Amino acid sequence: MVADVERQQFIDYIRNRGMRVTPERLALLEEIYRQHGHIDAEQLLDGVREAGHGVSRATVYRTLELLVDCGLVQRQRLGRERWLYEHVHAGQRHDHLSCRSCRRVVEFVSPAIQAMLNEICRAHGFSREERQLQILGLCEACADRAQRERSEHTPRALEAAAG
Ligand SMILES: [Zn+2]
Ligand SMILES: [Zn+2]
């Protein structure tokens, strides 16, 4: 469920841009807050259509742009081809560790990173609109497996020689 304060933030944002607050846009807001985790635009479109709204694909993409722009939604590629979207929990920004092998995504919140980014933007007089911070690599399980596979494929004699 989207909280009243978040719905109002979106409505104010749309009105300030001289745009219309349409039932479709509000339905998309509801839907992205109903779904949890990282979803792509197609999943959002399916969800909102299942809820009985006639929404075009173009409206989904345009509304997602607005939601990202007003800070209610984050988007990341998370090791995929397509953008993935998720609502922001109570205004709290988080970042991602993304395993390129099993595609597990770990979220973390770091006030230290937040403070550092604020400082960097300030130092450069940069007005930030969107933040995308993602670490790509291997999770612990996949790194262990890769390590085991490497050692299985290394002949014992070579291993011994390498010490
Ligand atoms: Zn993994
Ligand atoms: Zn996330």
Image: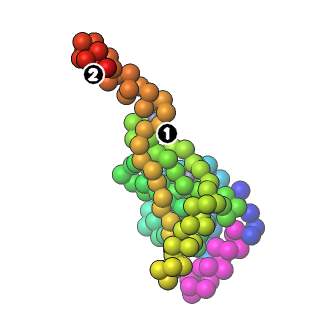
Residue farthest toward the top in the current orientation of the protein: 157
- Give the left or right position of residue 125, taking residue 34 as reference: left
Quadrant position of residue 153: top left
Dot 1 amino acid type: Arg
Q: Are marks 1 and 2 in contact (CB under 8 Å)?
A: no
Q: Secondary structure at mark 1?
A: loop
Residue 17 in the image, given as x and y percentages of width and height: 56, 85
Q: Position of residue 12 (x, y in %)?
A: 66, 80
Give the labeled residue for mark 2: 162
Residue 59 in sight = no
Q: Which residue is mark 1?
A: 104
Within 8 Å: ligand 1 and the Cβ of disc 1? yes
Of pointers 1 and 2, the one earlier in the residue sequence:
1
Q: Is residue 56 above or below residue 51?
A: below
Give the left or right position of residue 7, taking residue 51 as reference: right
What segment is highlighted magenta in the picture? 6-19
Q: Main secondary structure of the magenta part?
A: helix
Quadrant containing ligand 1 reads top left
Which residue is found at the position 44% from the left and 62% from the top? 57
